[in-house]
Image (cartoon, helix red, strand yellow):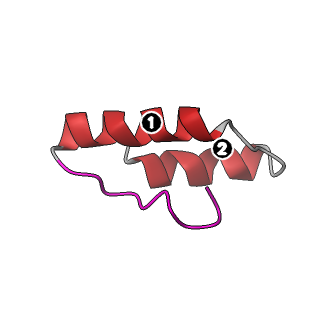
């Protein structure tokens, strides 16, 4: 899954989810490593 798709799924299960900003950055970095590019823009206010 892309980070965005996983994020959307977890939000459906737990609407008040607010992970630490550093963790979100790590997930974004992992996405870039796996897919060769960053697909999800974590600068959006929702992250």
Q: Which residues are magenta?
A: 37-47
Residue 5 as seen in the image, left or right of residue 18:
left
With 29 as the anchor, is 4 left or right in this view? Answer: right
Alpha carbon distance from label 2 to label 1: 14 Å
The residue indicated by pointer 1 is 27
Does the magenta portion include 46? yes
The residue lying at 61 percent from left, 48 percent from top is 9
Q: Secondary structure at mark 1?
A: helix
Where disc 2 sits, the SS reads helix
Q: Label 2: how many residues lie within 10 Å, few (<14), some (14-19) or many (20+)?
A: few
Question: Does residue 7 lie above or below 33 as drawn?
Answer: below
Q: Main secondary structure of the magenta part?
A: loop
Total marks placed: 2
Give residue 45's mark. Answer: none
Quadrant of the image for the C terminus?
bottom right
Nearest the eye: 10 or 26: 26
Residue at horizontal 22 percent and vertical 35 percent from the top: 34
Give the number of the mark in front: 2 or 1: 1
Instruction: Looking at the image, tell me whether mark 2 or mark 1 is earlier in sequence order.
Output: 2
Q: Which residue is mark 2?
A: 10
Residue 1: x and y in percent read 38, 43
């Amino acid at each position: 899954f892309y980070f965005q798709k996983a994020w959307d799924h977890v939000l459906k299960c737990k609407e008040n989810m607010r992970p630490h900003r550093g963790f979100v950055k790590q997930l974004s970095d992992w996405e870039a490593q796996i897919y060769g590019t960053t697909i999800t823009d974590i600068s959006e206010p929702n992250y």
